Image (tube, rainbow, N blue to C red):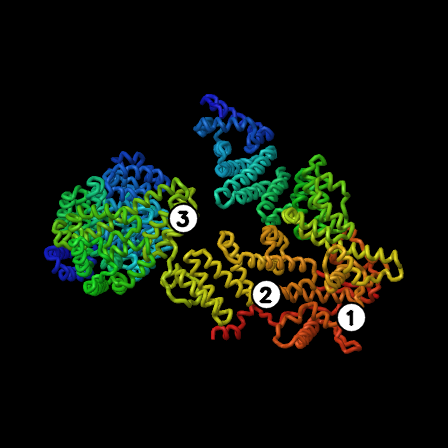
Amino acid sequence: MAYLSMGEAHRRISDYLNRFYDSVSSQDGSSLRQLLSVSSDSPHLLSLADALNVFQDANRLIKQADRYSQLGEIIAPLFRCLQNYRIGHLVDAYNAFEKSANAFLLEFRNWESAWAMEPLYVIAYEIRVLAEKADRELASYGKNPEKLKGAGSFLMKVFGALAGKGPKRVGALHVTCQLFKIYFKLGTVNLCRSAIRSIETARIFDFEEFPVRDKVTYMYYTGRLEVFNENFIAADKKLTYALMHCNPRREENIRMILKYLIPVKLSIGILPKSWLLDKYNLIEYNDVVQALKRGDLRLLRHALQEHEDRFLRSSVYLVLEKLELQVYQRLIKKIYISQKQRGPSKAHQIKLDVIVKALKWLEIDMDVDEVECIMAILIYKNLVKGYFAHKSKVAALSKQDPFPKLNGKPINSKGTHKNKNVPSVLGLIIPFFFFNFFVCGGGGG
Amino acid sequence: MLNSLSLFIGQKCQIVDSTGQASASLTPGHSLLPSATGSTAVSWTMHRTDYSSSENGLIPTSTYHHNQQTEPLSREVQDGLNAPSNASTSSNLEAANGPQEYAGYSSYTSSTDAYGYGNTGYQNGYYYNYPQQTTHSYSQQGGVYEHSGASYQPLISFQNTGPASYTSTYYNAADYQTTGGYPSNEYNNQTNLWNQGSYAHYPSHQYSAYTSDSNGAQSSSTVAATPLHYQQQYKPWADYYSQTDVSCAPGTENISVASATTSGCAVPGHTGGYPFSNSQPPPPGTTSWRPEPSSSELPSSQQAGAVTGDAHNVYWKNENGTSGIQNNVNPMPSYFQMPLNPNPLPYESSQDQQKIACPQGSNLQYSTISQVPQSQVPQNYQPPLQTFPSPDTRRVSKLQVPTNPRIASNLGLNLPKTDKDSSTTNAAAKPAYIGVSMLTSNDKVPSHESADSMFKMITKASADGTLYTRDWDTEPLFPLPDMHMVNKDGKNSGVVSSLPKYKRSPSRRTKSRWEPISEEKLVEKLASVNHVSVKEFSSGICERKDDGWNNSKLPSLQQQTPSKNSQRPVKKQRLGDTVDAAENDGASSDSDKEQGLTAYYSSAVALANSPEERKRRENRSKRFEAHGHRANVKHFRQKAVGARSFYSRRASVLELSRSYEDGGSRAVEDIDWDSLTVKGTCQEIEKRYLRLTSAPDPATVRPEEVLEKALLMVQNSQKNYLYKCDQLKSIRQDLTVQRIRNELTVKVYETHARSALEAGDLAEYNQCQSQLKSLYAEGIKGCHMEFSAYNLLCVILHSNNNRDLLSSMARLSDEARKDEALKHALAVRAAVTSGNHVLFFRLYKMAPNLNTCLMDLYVEKMRFEAVRCMSRAYRPTVPVTYIAQVLGFATVLPTIEGSEEKDMDGLEECEEWLRAHGACLITDNSGEMQLDTKASSSTLYMPEPEDAVAHGDTNLAVNDFLTRTS
């Protein structure tokens, strides 16, 4: 750092103070925003930080001028934050920033109009980013990283300040999204529920009223939550919304959405075009899609194993694993088709031995019992229509649509495949309920 | 009261004249004292008032005078805030003071921080200290007093001899404060300590209060700074006390009192005005204390910095008469001055005195005194409170002299002595001490007898030059003398007990002090920390006392002690031993015994000093460095903690935490918990689990070696799970309270987790699993893979939470994935998520370790799902034999018989199971049992578990419970 004279330092600080005051008094949100973005590394703030490190008594300057006094609570800790951030004391920087942010929030509550939304957004962003950095620093000391949690509770306060009837309520979704980011990072996604509830049920909020970018972010995160719960229909809806409204030039964002949307779509039987995977660099799904197309169980298992870490991290592993049944279905279907080509008369009777052989050919070693079990599951889950005769070890497929397509419905989705279209090959099966989660049944026959 | 005091004095004088006879004379005096308590109390109050006045006067002056205390006012106000800076300054000042003694003091001051000023310039500091301390001390004292019912007792001890009492009285955070006044140096230090941590901390701690806690708190505080002396002394005493239960008794009372006092105290402290404190303290303190005779006294003590003084005062009063309280106050200032002026000598003297008191009077006094003070104190204290308004500490002393002619004479004598010693202030202090000792002497007299034997031994040893070299452990502890001592102690205690106040003390004292067992225990437990003190007490060997510290420091201590001991020690000793004598003429040090004792004490003091210094350093380093000196700190703390460790430790923790909070950035996590950890002594291998509702008692906690045996015993036990669970829980508890986290801990948890799994006790298993998780995370070796597999299975089969499952899968390393158990677990997961029952039951049959047990819990679900699947997918029928085979019925009940029968069993069981779940079974032409799938698909249901209990825990079933307990 070049030598900085006291005068110059003084000038820079006063300049900043003036700008801060002016932007507040003129309610100029965008210029105030720039003054708050600590982590933006803007040259202006960096030089200010240098000046502050030279001119140690900035607080006096704040106090001297009456016009700053009401903002002193914000500025003084902000200066400390800038100083510490400049010299890499991130924990201290965060602590100071949190003080400043609290002071800002106090002031913000008093401002009737929503002019300061942008600065507030910046603060919500900065506090999260600084907290993450501070936590990294804490972790490097072997201490408990807890700052992000603190940032989360601050944002909850901000949310409380915004969730009202006034014009500021449009900012609520932005804060919610910042909260989501924190909760997902912390792995405490269950905390999202309260925010979601207030966003989706409170009458003061009209979802369409929120800014698009916030809506997209919100849908992305809630969609991910639905993936966790394997609630594929809802996940599909939300992620598709996010995808449709996402700025098409933000390819990185689109990729993030697709990363979750593709497994969801796969599990409801919809396969992506390969150019989509290529364009957004989602090649890890290529093999999965291929396996689904070919009924290649080996390829699926291989793909899962190869990208296990990635899938586990993005928490789609279990979703992808469940595609196995669809691959089995595809495999059986292929057998069925080939049998049909040879002789249509007995094509709907598939011997267990044939399936075992096919699997052997795929280098998957399964004995008859296991394959029988798989067949039973396929029938049970309505991926295959028909029945299994244990005595003769033969699966008898329905002559009509033996391999029903999912068509946007998840496997075994309760109530959706209630044999409406199932041929009544199997005789009378009365739908019944077990507990309240499972419906199994066959059409009356 | 004055009359009574005079009588006492007279007796004391007699005692002084002839120490041998003194005991006899003293005893009468003692008896008189109890009866005369009322009168004495009055006299005490007088003294106290004087003291308080003197203190007050001193305080202002001192504060102003102190240059070092550039911001005396601010410091006082800020106290805690300034403390750090003050501490630093104080340390510097202390350094300036130079003398070893000072250093010790300085350490004290440093600990106290703000109070530390005293360290800087004792003289200056004293004054400052007084003001600050007084204010602080008042508030603190309030806390202290409150804390200590015990503290009160300590007060008594204080009265006996500031230092000695301190050591003995652990209780005595309150003592410390009070002592702050008395020992000037030490007291200041103590007070400082108290003030620093204690202001905030003590109250809470005290409240939390273990009476012993108060002690503990003190010890903790002492640990920080002053603790060294105190600790040493405390330790031994503490040990005794702890054994005796003395601490406990005071504690209960103290606690309530403490709360009240604290409020009052705080106020006074803030006001800084003694009068205020006095006035305020009385209400709070009085409330609790008043109910008890002692309690009333306590309030007064609490009320003002005077409080400590009060306790002292009480003693003083006895000595001086009514003026005792004031005297106490005075002594405080005087001491402070003394240290400042004379530097080492005064300090030593004060220390010596304290020490002396401790050994001689302290023993007896401690137990007895504590109670006694309470009873007496109230009366005394109240008067003092009134007197306090006119605070001129030094003046007070003067006042005292006039007020109580006889006492005054004593005081006068004392003063001259102090003058002789080094500083007039010291002299003043001495009088106070003397007075105290006198008071205590009554109680102490018996102890003196015992002490005499000790003295003799010690003096002998010292004469031989074997004092430090002799192995005191092997030495019969006052072998015959010991017996005598014990008896004497008992007598003393008895005497004390005869006094209304002493109710509890006697028995305890008899037990604790000189019994070898207790000492041994102490040694074992305290080891590094306590050893010193204990040994010193028992053996008088300085070297042993402080491990590293002692060794290095002892020499200096010893050196100091000799010089000081020769003159002052004797006086002090006598004071302590025979208060009368001490009062009459500190110079009238009679026998070599006294010297020996003094040496003994001095050594203890020296030790204390060294540890204090170290503590100081540690504190400093702590402030500036996050972790650096923890080890040292630990040592100190451990040492300091002493036998009472638990309570005191807890209290100290609380204090520490408070102090840390005050410090601002210091978090609880910075507390050195190691020093506060219990060390068990129980040798029983078998122990029933009992949930702790209070601090653990080391006597019921098993050390690691024993726990190891206990674990083996449980592992080899043929008894049922309930017994094992009980035993393992108690082992876990012992491990936890001792904070043992090593491979043994892992073994215990693993053993417990396994047996819980075998018994299907998931709740207990989960507890173990979560502990194991963190233990493994700390890098402690164990069957990590095995338990990761259990964990995974648990998540899969029981929590059914995809996020948990994903995160635990993501955490698995490549190496872990190759592990047999984990591979199995992962395969089970795959089977479960895909609903592949065939695979599941195959895995079930070949499960490694106890994976089977976890899978057992999922079998029912899996079977039901499978049968539903079958009934839906199969047509027209499925043979039951196939179902039994696929769903693992054949192996559910392992039988020793042939395979055929096994199959038959499995078949029957399967059939039973199917029927129980609503399946339609038919017999086909060949006579084979078949599942009618179409019919069954609509009739299957999950039956209510037969063994379900309304309260959900079958283990709580009455029959089972009865069989378990039988």
Crowd class of label 3 (few under 14; some 14 to 19; many from 20; radius 10 Å) = many
Image quadrant assignment for residue B71: top left
On whether disc 1 and disc 2 are found on a single subunit, the reply is: yes
Q: Secondary structure at mark 1?
A: strand
C-alpha gap between disc 1 and disc 3: 71 Å
Mark 2: give few (<14), some (14-19) or many (20+) Cα within 10 Å.
some
Query: What residue is pinned by disc 1?
Result: B877
Q: Are marks 1 and 2 in contact (CB under 8 Å)?
A: no
Mark 1 surroundings within 10 Å by alpha-carbon count, few (fewer than 14), some (14 through 19), many (20 or more): many
Residue B859 percent coordinates (x, y): 64, 66
Q: Residue at x 63, y 37 (%)?
A: A167
Q: Which residue is mark 2?
A: B853
- Residue type indicated by callout 3: Ile
Mark 3 = which residue? B671
Label 1, label 2: how many angstroms apart (C-alpha)? 32 Å
Left or right: B184 with respect to B12? right
Residue B115 is tagged as none
Left or right: B227 in relation to A372: left
Q: Earlier in the sequence, mark 1 or mark 2?
A: 2
Chain ID at mark 2: B
Kind of residue at disc 2: Cys
Mark 2 / mark 3, whichever is N-terminal: 3
Pointers 2 and 3 in contact (C-beta within 8 Å)? no
Q: Is residue B878 left or right of residue B206?
A: right
In percent of width and height, residue A50 lies at 49, 27
SS label for mark 2: helix
